[in-house]
Image: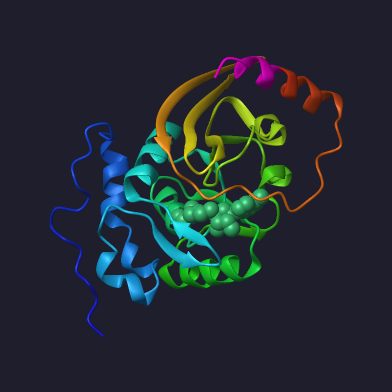
Amino acid sequence: MNEPLRPASWPPAWPDVTDPGVLAAIAETPRHEFVPHASLDQAYEDIALPIGRGQTISQPYIVALMTQALALTPESRVLEVGTGSGYQAAVLAHLTPHVWSVESVPELAATAEARLRRLGYPVQLRVGDGRLGWPEAAPFDGILVAAAARSVPPALVVQLADGGRLVIPLGDSAWDQRLWLIEKHGDTLSKAFLAEVRFVPLVYTEPADADDAALANIRRKLQKLFEHS
Ligand code: SAH
């Protein structure tokens, strides 16, 4: 079978993605390994593509933008919510060997795991509701949510290290979503708008967290942070 060659001009020039490490990570990650056969000839187009089960592999530009926003170093510990094809996790693994990723659909997780192992990416994977994070591996310097949530899951903020960064699309519908960067400094949270986006919805597969004091406190802070947006 003919593998599509990565075009010489990959990745394309993105005005707002300039981090050389991120651009190298995108250049080195073989996206054709992560898309279904039927879409092979589109692997190096800057578009999202279907991967089955109603899910998609994200648009490379958005993957790059979210990765850049995390400002990772090789020491960073990073959690992804929504493994999907494993492409985003592979891009992260080019920047740090400490990557955890949670996927709620077992079949997608199994395919992504086999693929990431075959390609030699040392990503730790788990099937579950990523809204609850991965408490045993916390704290994380970066958390990347690859599906649109109605509000920020407070457990993810609890699992963020001091100085940590969370990138998450928020919105009620497919047409009205915004990508946010949230930073945690001590007791303070700040937010910055990154882009208008379109993600598949974050599905809640497990019951809500028991509302302990730490979660209730974060929930209050998040409500305040987003009350006018
Ligand atoms: N990062 C992926 C694209 C993800 S699409 C890639 O690079 O290919 C969003 C993914 O989030 C889907 O695979 C979907 O099944 C998963 N998902 C949705 N809700 C989830 C949840 N609560 N926990 C974990 N994964 C979830």
Image location (x, y in percent) of residue 155: 72, 35
Residue at 70% across / 30% down in the picture? 158
Residue 124 showing in the rendered view: no
The picture quadrant where one finds residue 41 is bottom left
Residue 76 showing in the rendered view: yes
Q: Is residue 107 above or below residue 83?
A: below
Q: How many marks?
A: 0
Q: Is residue 10 above or below residue 171?
A: below
The picture quadrant where one finds residue 222 is top right
The residue closer to the viewer here, 42 or 142, is: 42
The picture quadrant where one finds residue 109 is bottom right
Quarter placement of the N terminus = bottom left
Quarter placement of the C terminus = top right
Highlighted magenta segment, given as a residue range: 221-229
Ligand 1, by image quadrant, is: bottom right
Q: Is residue 144 above or below residue 128?
A: above
Snapshot colouring:
rainbow
The residue positioned farthest toward the bottom in the image shown: 1
Image location (x, y in percent) of residue 147: 55, 46
Q: Is residue 20 left or right of residue 140?
A: left
Image location (x, y in percent) of residue 59: 36, 50
Membership of 71 in magenta stretch: no
Q: Is residue 222 left or right of residue 123?
A: right
Q: Is residue 5 left or right of residue 39?
A: left
Membership of 226 in magenta stretch: yes
Residue at 37% across / 43% down in the picture? 62
Image location (x, y in percent) of residue 196: 41, 33
